[in-house]
Amino acid sequence: MQASKRAYRGRVVQMDAAFSVLADAIIWIEGNRIVAVTDASVAPPPGLEHLSPVVTGGTFFPGLIELHNHLAYDILKLWAVPKPYKNRAGWQGKPEYQALVSGPMTVLGKAPGIAPAIARYTEAKCLVGGTTTSQGLTLFSAAGIKRKYRGLVRNAEESLDANLPDAQAQIPDFAASKKDIFLKYLKTHKCMLLHLSEGIDASARKHFLDLRIGPNEWAIAPSLTGIHCNALHREDFDRLAQVGAGMVWSPLSNLMLYGQTADIVAAKAAGLRIGIGSDWSPTGSKNLLHEMKVIWQYSQTNGGLFSQRDIVAMATIGAAGLLRWDRYLGSIEAGKYADLMLVRGNSGDPYASLIKADETQVDLVVIDGVPRYATLGLAAGFSATSEEISFAGEKRLVNLDDASADEAVAGLGLAKAQETLSQAMADLAGMAEHAVAFERMAPTLRAKTLPPQAQWTLVLDQDEPHDLNLRPRFTDEAHMPLLVRLSEAATPLAKIVPSALKPQKLDPLTVAGDPDYYPSLQAQMNIPAAIKQGLHG
């Protein structure tokens, strides 16, 4: 289905410079752009007079922009973290993590035909929560080609749009030899999303301190957006803020793994720009909509750090600013791309309505002018290939029709992807044997005998050794070869013991449709009781 002329009527939270909220307005769309946003009583723009606006009875927001998510892992349910850790190395090498997270993902990521199902399913998880931009999945083919998955949800790392500069999410395949070279790299890009000082001990903070070049010079630039930043001190946040850098905050994952998150009070006091991300489903929120609730609860239990409008801004216009996309996305204004989400109802505080909403209140999601997810009543124009999903007594249609669909998911529906993943996760031991046999096949043989979908596997960024592709490593502190191929970086299948892999269940698409989600959160030992109580309430 191609984008065309559309008009939607409802309350509109523009998230523009004035934070305008229009009680009864119409969003006029032509192609992939917003032509105008007008009061409902105003005449239509020229050329759109024939349109009858769809009356929604809801509240429109810009589509949510997520700045950090390891999407490949978002098929997994919450991991019962056994204790608080000090840094990433503390949990990545633990047997329980390997048995429940890295081991299963190594198998599923390398088994034939599974990567496309993961791509399709995790993209749908974004849609149902109103996320229209996230980080991307990296695919690797039998022919040795590494590339980003090209889906319906915008990929911050490969936008495929000259107006939206690609964010650099990692150092490409090498450790920086000198800090001044890394600084030059930062200065040649608009945005770099980089794990920075994840953890709470001195070794985690050292990753930031290693950016120091000299007494008054640091390898920091406006393009740097540090992910997590748990170990940073007030003076570190000041240093980032002074050059216009930013950070991505993922408090739920931080709390689950480390028992504490970044010193967000210090980050706010420094004037640091803040975006948000759900991180990944094993220790984070199922989607960005839920992460916003965690942030609200954290704010409330720590003296009211942020207003609800502040939090919405972190997921919309603020995030777009960090990506340098704010000229085209992040607010509902004439000339911008039509990325929208609609929340049911149009009364009361609009920002509170979004923070309180779960997926049952998300009634419409539009990306690049095309409606991709909607209630049955708002799905006019959806193609015949649209699929119906049900959760928590609600029914929705998902529109996956795309003339330029990535070959990895071409013809693959959501229901089929869900079935494929459910079966594979129920037989991880068998899948491990299948994946080993697949890996042993010569690449040329795989390319000749398997259809395109089956040839693609996943690059698992969370489990690359020593976080090589998650932070810079300089010659004076690196203890590994300077060159590490991504295709060799994930846990080798040869180290996986099939009998040690236990069957797992696919993580449901929504929080509202997952009866185990909140009980699992309540059982997490590292989340403060006040936050668990607030989320439960």
Image: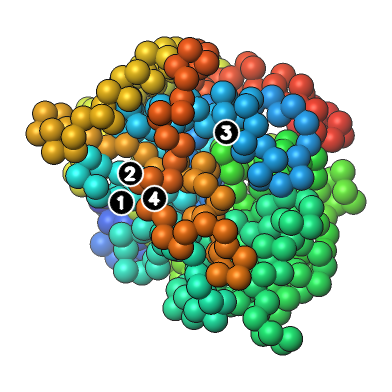
Q: Whole-percent x and y of residue 212? A: 68, 77
Q: Amino acid at mark 2?
A: Leu
| Quadrant assignment for the C terminus | top right
State the separation of the CA atoms marked 3 and 4: 23 Å
Label 3 or label 4, whichever comes before in sequence order? 3
Res 401 quadrant in image: top left
Q: Nearer the viewer, residue 447 or 148?
A: 447
Label pair 1/2, CB-CB below 8 angstroms: yes
Residue at screen point 37% across, 53% down: 485
- Badge 1 crowding class, 10 Å Cα cut-off, few under 14, some 14 to 19, many 20 or more, is some
- Residue 48 visible in this rendered orientation of the protein: no
Mark 3 crowd level (few <14, some 14–19, many ≥20, 10 Å Cα): many
Q: Amino acid at mark 3?
A: Ser
Looking at the image, residue 412 sits to the left or right of residue 519; the answer is left
Q: Which one is closest to the eye, mark 1 or mark 3?
A: 1
Mark 4 or 1: the one toward you: 4
In the rendered structure, which disc, 2 or 4, sits on the residue that comes first in sequence? 2
Q: Is 54 in front, or is 524?
A: 524
Say whether disc 4 or disc 1 marks the residue closer to the N-terminus.
1
- Mark number displayed over residue 486: 4
In this rendering, the label closer to the viewer, 2 or 4? 4
Query: Residue visible at 69% across and 58% down?
Result: 197
Q: Residue furthest left?
A: 448
User: Which mark is on residue 281?
Assistant: 3
- Say few, some or many: other residues with alpha carbon within 10 Å of mark 4 (under 14 / 14 to 19 / 20 or more): some
User: Looking at the rendered structure, which numbered label has been put on residue 147?
Assistant: 1
Name above or below for residue 408 compared with residue 522.
below
Mark 2 sits on what residue?
139
Where residue 11 appears, x then y in whole percent? 56, 48
Mark 1 or mark 3: whose residue is earlier in sequence:
1
